[in-house]
Image (cartoon, rainbow, N blue to C red):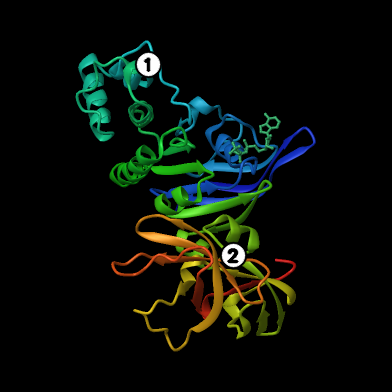
Amino acid sequence: MSLISIENVHKHYGDYHALRDINLEVGQGEFFSLLGPSGCGKTTLLRTIAGFEDVSSGQVRIGGASMIGVPANQRPTNMVFQSYAIFPHMSVAENVGFGLRKSSLSGAEKATAVGEALEMVGLNGFGARAAHALSGGQRQRVALARALILKPKVLLLDEPLSALDKKMREQMQSELRRLQRQVGITFILVTHDQEEALIMSDRIAVMFDGKIAQLDPPPQLYTRPANRQVAEFIGVMTFLPGNRRADTLEVAGLGHVTLSPDQIIGAEGDVRVGLRPESMTILFDDMAAEPSNRVAQGTVEDLAYYGDMTMYEVRLAGAPRPVTVSMRNLPGRPVLARGDAARVVWDPAALMAFGPVD
Ligand code: ATP
């Protein structure tokens, strides 16, 4: 049973068509993300659910009820923004309790609710602190507690972690996920960070140019992208030129491959052949190649060392550009240098052939 249903939604700003025929359903208790590059319309879509924007045409339902014409403050939604939007002159407890100011709860009941909300976001004992004296991560927790205290059916999150540094962002990602499971409220997250969306979401809608390009759980998006644009946006992918006739593919630097149907996306002819870094490895002396895999000779053009792994840019003989290969760094295994020869083992079953029209 879906909680939110969006049907044939369009949004025009004057001549600009910001949302183009959006259709999607979000389930009760689901962690759903809207992912796409800047300007693709994800914030606009979130704001039409919140009631901060009207749709130009189409329908938005929450819990079966039409939200057309229903103002934001009468919708069963609440929103957490990128900028923390907390009141700096108030205490943490006053900020969190702000939404309850018009409720009929007694003072003691409000204090209990504030305490519970602070505990939920890991800010036990912070109630009396001045909000302006908090760190970025703590402010965002206050904003979350303030949104959750009203017990919305849907929590809308507009890039809530993008102002935080990398470590704090990663910590908040797992905490948000845990919190969402704990409270069971439907979360809709807007992000342009594909890794964040993959980590946190039950399902992701990938948007480009006001349209949904693909709507799937993270593993399907990553392994079965609907088109080249999605494949390029989700994770790292190298593209080599190729030519496909039926199930036979000729790839520059790799040679002939016979494809299975799920490796073919779009029309035949001149194609772009997509390879993920983890579908290739460099053959070191301590390793044996899988019999089903193939080996191509190349030269390391560049590398990035991450400690646990190294990303190599390897130019294969006959290829017009390098491929990106990720390798785990194991004890005793050398890290190659620029100019070193490298034997690249690749899995023909992991290629994707994207046609000229995909
Ligand atoms: P970002 O990650 O940069 O916020 P986004 O995907 O959230 O991008 P939106 O904010 O939804 O994108 O904007 C989509 C398009 O609609 C953009 O081209 C934007 O300039 C345009 N737009 C948004 N709001 C308005 C407005 N009030 N008037 C006119 N155009 C607008």
User: Could you tell me which residue is drawn at 54 percent across and 48 percent down?
Assistant: 35
For badge 2, the amino acid type reads Thr
User: Where residue 39 appears, x then y in whole percent?
Assistant: 65, 40
User: Where residue 32 appears, x then y in whole percent?
Assistant: 46, 49
**Residue 178: quadrant of the picture:** top left
- Ligand 1 within 8 A of label 1's CB? no
User: Where residue 57 appears, x then y in whole percent?
Assistant: 70, 41
Q: First in sequence: mark 2 or mark 1? A: 1
Quarter of the C terminus within the rendering: bottom right
Quarter of the N terminus within the rendering: bottom left
For badge 1, the amino acid type reads Lys
**Residue 187: quadrant of the picture:** top left
- Give the alpha-carbon distance from disc 2 to disc 1, as whole Å: 56 Å
**Dot 1: element:** loop
Q: Which residue is mark 2?
A: 238
Residue 66 in view: yes
Most extreme residue toward the right is 15
Q: Is label 2 in contact with label 1 (beta carbons under 8 Å)?
A: no
Say left or right for 276 vs 244. left
Say left or right for 141 vs 21. left
User: Could you tell me which residue is drawn at 34 percent across and 12 percent down?
Assistant: 90
**Dot 2: element:** strand
Quarter of the rendered image showing ligand 1: top right
Residue 103 in view: no
Q: Nearer the viewer, residue 234 or 215?
A: 234
Q: Which residue is mark 1?
A: 102
Q: Is residue 125 above or below residue 32?
A: above
Say left or right for 249 vs 161. right
Q: Nearer the viewer, residue 350 or 201?
A: 350
